[in-house]
Image (spheres, rainbow, N blue to C red):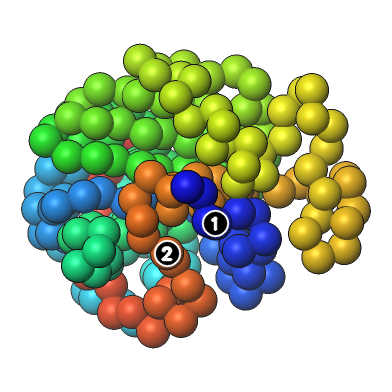
């Protein structure tokens, strides 16, 4: 049963506007940050505490590498109820939804990733053991691809995605029918698939193991 919705995730854009402008957030089951970095053929970078520091370092790395490298910030999350997961955050990045990297890296595990960039492009990827189960654009959830594109359709409606036959989703705080809630809905769907609840406190207080990869 789905217990998380868009209303539970509007804090992300409110509390972390710089990161929310362009990000990729990925959750990978059963891999440590070091193992995930190896699978992505990355190199180690200095650890950082809090997403403000991660965002600053990500843009510094882009400038220093002339746009050739992307920062990865990783942390172990989860508990006994949901198991061990690694959270991967990429400010202004998209490795987590790049299938020629994400699908091989998902071997033997579950991979859930969503992405938004400053041009309004977005993507959601759910993979299991190198197989793309679901891929869609959160702003346009009516079009879906993968081996099980409709398995989560009821869940998607429940968490707050807006479909053509539903009309626009209402803002949970103001009731505004024109509010775009696709990003909070993507967070809610990711939580449904992983059981991992991201919080402002986690993003602000976590010390992230960092690495970098060549830009795809």
The residue carrying mark 2 is: 197
- Kindly report which numbered mark, 1 or 2, lies closer to the viewer in this rendering: 1
Q: Which residue is drawn at 79% across and 23% down?
A: 165
Judge by depth and name the residue closer to the eye, 192 or 67. 192
Residue 195: which disc? none
Quarter of the rendering occupied by the C terminus: top left
Depicted 3 relative to depicted 151: above or below: below
Residue 34 relative to residue 216: left or right = left
Residue at the spot 87% in from the left edge and 63% down from the top edge: 174
- Tell me which label, 1 or 2, sits earlier in the chain: 1
Using the image as rendered, state which of residue 205 and residue 18 is in the foreground.
205
Assess whether mark 2 and mark 1 are in contact (beta carbons under 8 angstroms).
Answer: yes
**Can residue 66 be seen?**
no
Give x and y (percent) for residue 181: 71, 48
Q: Where is residue 39 in the image (x, y as percent from the top left)?
A: 13, 43
Under circle 1, the secondary element is loop
* Residue at x-position 24% and y-position 75%: 47
Q: Please tell me in which quadrant of the rendered image residue 205 appears.
A: bottom left
Q: Residues within 10 Å of mark 1 (few under 14, many from 20)?
A: some
Q: Percent x, y for residue 57?
A: 39, 69
Q: Name the residue under label 1.
A: 4
User: What residue is drawn where x is 79% and y is 43%?
Assistant: 169
Instruction: Determine whether, in the image, residue 80 is placed left or right of residue 162.
Output: left
Side of 176 relative to 89 (left or right)? right
In the image, residue 99 sits, relative to residue 105, either above or below, namely: above
Judged from this view, the residue extending furthest toward the front is: 1
Question: Is label 2 in a helix, a strand or a loop?
Answer: loop
Q: Residue 81: in sight, yes or no? A: yes
């Amino acid at each position: 049963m789905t217990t998380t919705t868009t209303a539970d995730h509007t804090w992300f854009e409110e509390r972390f506007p710089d990161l929310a402008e362009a990000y990729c957030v990925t959750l990978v089951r059963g891999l440590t940050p070091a193992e995930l970095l190896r699978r992505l053929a990355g190199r180690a970078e200095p650890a950082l505490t809090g997403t403000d520091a991660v965002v600053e370092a990500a843009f510094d790395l882009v400038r220093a590498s002339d746009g050739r490298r992307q920062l990865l910030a990783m942390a172990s999350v989860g508990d006994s109820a949901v198991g061990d997961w690694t959270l991967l955050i990429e400010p202004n990045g998209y490795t987590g939804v790049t299938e020629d990297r994400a699908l091989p890296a998902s071997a033997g595990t579950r991979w859930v990733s969503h992405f938004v960039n400053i041009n309004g492009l977005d993507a959601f990827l759910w993979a299991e053991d190198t197989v793309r189960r679901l891929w869609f654009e959160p702003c346009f959830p009516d079009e879906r691809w993968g081996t099980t594109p409709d398995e989560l359709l009821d869940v998607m409606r429940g968490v707050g995605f807006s479909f053509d036959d539903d009309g626009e989703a209402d803002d949970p705080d103001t009731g505004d029918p024109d509010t775009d809630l696709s990003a909070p809905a993507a967070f809610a769907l990711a939580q449904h698939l992983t059981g991992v609840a991201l919080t402002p406190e986690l993003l602000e207080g976590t010390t992230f193991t960092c690495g970098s990869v060549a830009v795809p």
